[in-house]
Amino acid sequence: MQHHWLRNLAAVAFVGLVLVGCSSTGKKAQTPGSLPADEQPSVTAPPSEGEISRSVDAEGNPINPQTGMPLGRIIYFGYDKAVLPPESLPLLELHAAFLRNNPDRRVLIEGNTDERGTREYNLALGERRSDAVRTFLVSTGVRRSQVDTVSYGEERPADAGHDEAAWAKNRRAVLVYQL
């Protein structure tokens, strides 16, 4: 069973890398390294299935068994992109393992964009971002019924600024666990 999800993880990572490598808009995408240190994605090796427990924090978010801290819940995307960044895959695998081991838990994935683009375009892009996270989770064995998605487009900015630093924080998908 463990080899099955590792194979799926490798396949999704490969496809993501190919898509990222093949896309070229001439614009420099925001890299995770340029985000503030407290907003960097958590990159750790996926634990074994037995390491993910039912432990949650006060808000119901899963605890990382390696650090004892709540798992990061934000996946950042490049400008005009809905492809999962490769550095987000280890974090998403931790969420997938938690959901597989806790079939009674549900997660809502909120897709968000920066303010550039029309309202309709941003709602569609936010939907593609939340769908990308859901597709990854389901491909690793999470039941589709455990994962819901919603797009807020540009309506719920994490940073109300009007510059690249603010926009980078707003291009995201957020995992919200339901109690």
Image (tube, rainbow, N blue to C red):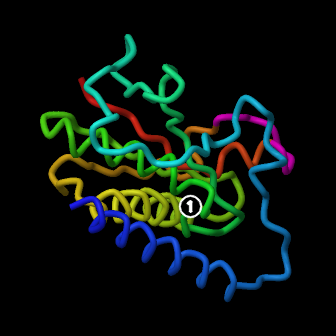
Q: Secondary structure at mark 1?
A: helix
Q: Residue at x 86, y 47 (%)?
A: 163
Q: Residue at x 37, y 28 (%)?
A: 62
User: Can you say whether 117 is above or below 111 in the image?
Assistant: below
Q: Quadrant of the C terminus?
A: top left
x and y percentages locating residue 172 in the rendered image: 58, 49
Q: Is residue 47 magenta?
A: no
Query: In the figure, residue 169 lies in which quadrant?
Result: top right
User: Can you say whether 26 is above or below 103 in the image?
Assistant: below
Q: Is residue 160 magenta?
A: yes
User: Viewer-proximal residue, 19 or 118?
Assistant: 19
**Amino acid type for the residue under numbered disc 1:** Asn
Q: Main secondary structure of the magenta part?
A: loop
* Left or right placement of residue 155 versus residue 97 in this view: right
Q: Residues within 10 Å of mark 1 (few under 14, many from 20)?
A: many
Which residue, given by chain and number where applicable, does mark 1 sit on? 122
Count of residue discs: 1
Q: Residue at x 42, y 43 (%)?
A: 47
x and y percentages locating residue 60 in the rendered image: 33, 20
Residue range corresponding to the magenta coloring: 158-165
x and y percentages locating residue 16 in the rendered image: 55, 75
User: Viewer-proximal residue, 63 or 114?
Assistant: 63
User: Can you say whether 177 is above or below 168 in the image?
Assistant: above
Q: Residue furthest top?
A: 58
Q: Residue at x 54, y 25 (%)?
A: 67
Q: Residue furthest bottom?
A: 22
Query: In the figure, residue 48 lies in which quadrant?
Result: top left
* Left or right placement of residue 44 versus residue 61 in this view: right
User: Viewer-proximal residue, 141 or 178?
Assistant: 141
